[in-house]
């Protein structure tokens, strides 16, 4: 089946050009001007045509936590937000510590996911044998929680980490917070305030020192072992100095990610939004927020992602020590960055680079992340002048809420194509086809 997109402003590989794109089956057949086709024609009417967003960090909660979210519900929200591919984390129930459990998640996604998908292998203190069975042509990488977790998901023993860093040849994605620093800070504040500790002290518990201690250790260990690491959700200005912009991304062994919430919010938003913006690592100062954006712009930070991590509102309404960290963002990440573009903070080409191109390059994804002939037709149409307000009626995450409620975005995702399938059009879904399992280059 052919679909021809005409009259688009194509944003791709550092340029914005007028043109048409012909889709044949699941691939981009041709890019050019004044193209014709015997199939369906979609007039984009001068809107922006972007490669589909690749979100390298989401938590879709299935299996085991489906009261919060499911692969179906959250992939649906993703597609509505222009995310055509995602990489999902192993902190489900049970955690993804074996190849069998990993494959079970792929089976769920093959049945239910509207977007393309990959799943990280999980890490415990004693599953190295399972880790080394990972097929790196079919799995995006390994996730290690070096802080902010419990039970076997927390791996912060230096000897164990060095064994893993020395043995695993793929990308290791890291949550870096020093657990001892966090626990000591928690005890100090608990003694002072009890269970009702004010949320504004969250950045002092999940402190700059705790973040830097963990991320700097990870970087030094990676250099020692020659490991390919990707440090997730930087939250402090000082951490950005650990990363380099002197070589192309394809040659980097140590890379970093910024998340939408650390770019959009700062500590001044805690009184207004409360537990809705309790994340780990914590949202910190306006100075940190500005430094993270600067590092995105100068290429010390390579990727922008969401860390979509939904919880129910009832769970979020708990006191500080009981309220879980995380929130739903996958539907609103692209339009939030479009808002930054509208405000003159970042070019549209840079948004596409950080959200589409760079995840594909960093993870060596096959034939996605760019608008190129022969590549999969993962495409998003964005109208830059169609204002809309986020409210409960248009939030698609299963949890039903968003820290962006009440926000008016000037841009709107109007159409999303997932591997050639017109999965989302003008607010309506076509759920007759699911997304595809992403594959990866290994040499």
Image (tube, grey):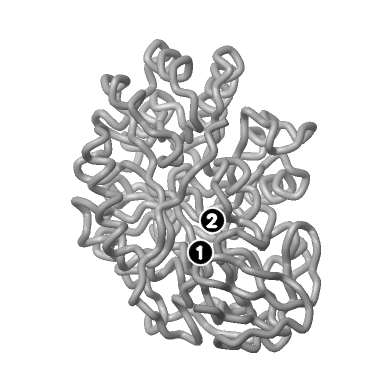
Locate residue 358, reporting x and y percent. Answer: 64, 48
Q: Which residue is drawn at 46% across and 32% down?
A: 177
| Label 2 residue SS | strand
| Label 1 residue SS | strand
Which residue, as the protein is rendered here, is positioned at the far front? 38
Locate residue 312, reporting x and y percent. Answer: 28, 63
Q: Residue 123 carries which label?
A: none
Nearer to us in this view, 139 or 149:
139
Locate residue 387, reporting x and y percent. Answer: 61, 85
Residue 267 visible (yes or no)? no
Question: Which quadrant holds residue 27?
Answer: bottom right
Residue 165 visible (yes or no)? yes
Does residue 17 appear to the left or right of 217 in the view shown? right
Does residue 112 appear to the left or right of 94 in the view shown? right
Nearer to us in this view, 119 or 393:
119
Q: Residue at x 54, y 30 (%)?
A: 229
* Among the two numbered marks 1 and 2 on one chain, the one whose residue lies closer to the N terminus: 2
Q: Which residue is drawn at 55% across and 14% down?
A: 225
Vertical placement of residue 229 versus 374, above or below: above
Locate residue 100, reporting x and y percent. Answer: 22, 37
Quadrant (top left, top right, bottom left, bottom right) of the C terminus? top right
Does residue 169 appear to the left or right of 190 in the view shown? right
Nearer to us in this view, 263 or 220:
220
Question: Which quadrant holds residue 349?
Answer: bottom right
> Dot 1 surroundings within 10 Å: few (below 14), some, or many (20 or more)?
many
Q: Which residue is drawn at 45% across and 27% down?
A: 178
Question: Which quadrant holds residue 194?
Answer: top left
- Asked if marks 1 and 2 touch (Cβ < 8 Å), the reply is yes
- Read off the residue under disc 2: 54
- Read off the residue under disc 1: 83
> Dot 2 surroundings within 10 Å: few (below 14), some, or many (20 or more)?
many
């Amino acid at each position: 089946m052919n679909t021809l997109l005409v009259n688009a402003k194509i944003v791709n590989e550092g340029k914005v050009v007028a043109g048409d794109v012909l889709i044949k089956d699941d691939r981009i057949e041709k890019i050019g001007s004044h193209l014709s086709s015997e199939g369906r024609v979609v007039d984009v009417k001068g809107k922006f045509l972007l490669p589909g967003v690749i979100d390298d960090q989401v938590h879709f909660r299935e299996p085991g936590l489906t009261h919060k979210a499911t692969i179906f519900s959250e992939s649906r929200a993703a597609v509505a937000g222009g995310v055509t591919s995602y990489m999902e984390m192993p902190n489900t129930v049970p955690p993804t510590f074996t190849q069998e459990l990993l494959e079970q998640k792929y089976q769920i996604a093959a049945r239910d996911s509207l977007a393309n998908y990959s799943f990280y292998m999980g890490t415990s203190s004693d599953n190295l044998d399972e880790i080394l069975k990972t097929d790196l042509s079919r799995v995006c990488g390994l996730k290690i929680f070096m802080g902010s977790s419990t039970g076997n998901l927390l791996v912060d023993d230096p000897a164990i980490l060095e064994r893993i860093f020395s043995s695993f040849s793929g990308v290791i994605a890291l949550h870096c917070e020093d657990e001892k620093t966090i626990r000591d800070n928690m005890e100090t504040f608990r003694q002072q305030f009890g269970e009702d500790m004010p949320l504004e002290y969250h950045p002092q518990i999940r402190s700059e020192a705790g973040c830097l201690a963990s991320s700097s250790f990870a970087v030094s260990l990676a250099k020692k072992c020659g490991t390919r690491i990707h440090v997730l959700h930087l939250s402090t200005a000082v951490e950005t100095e650990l990363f380099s912009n002197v070589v192309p991304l394809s040659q980097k062994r140590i890379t970093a990610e910024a998340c939408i919430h650390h770019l959009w919010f700062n500590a001044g938003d805690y009184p207004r939004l409360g537990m809705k913006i309790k994340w780990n690592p914590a949202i910190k100062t306006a100075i940190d927020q500005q430094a993270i954006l600067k590092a995105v712009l100068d290429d010390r930070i390579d990727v922008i992602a969401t860390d979509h991590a939904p919880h129910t509102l009832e769970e979020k309404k708990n006191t500080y020590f009981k309220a879980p960290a995380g929130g739903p963002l996958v539907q609103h990440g692209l339009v939030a960055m479009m808002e930054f573009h509208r405000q003159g903070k970042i070019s549209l080409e840079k948004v596409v680079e950080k959200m589409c191109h760079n995840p594909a390059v960093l993870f060596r994804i096959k034939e996605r992340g760019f608008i190129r002939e022969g590549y999969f037709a993962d495409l998003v149409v964005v109208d830059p002048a169609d204002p809309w307000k986020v409210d409960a009626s248009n939030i698609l995450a299963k949890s039903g809420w968003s820290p962006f409620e009440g926000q008016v975005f000037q841009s709107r995702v109007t159409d999303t194509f997932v591997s050639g399938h017109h999965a989302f059009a003008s607010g309506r879904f076509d759920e007759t086809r699911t997304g595809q399992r992403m594959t990866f280059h290994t040499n």
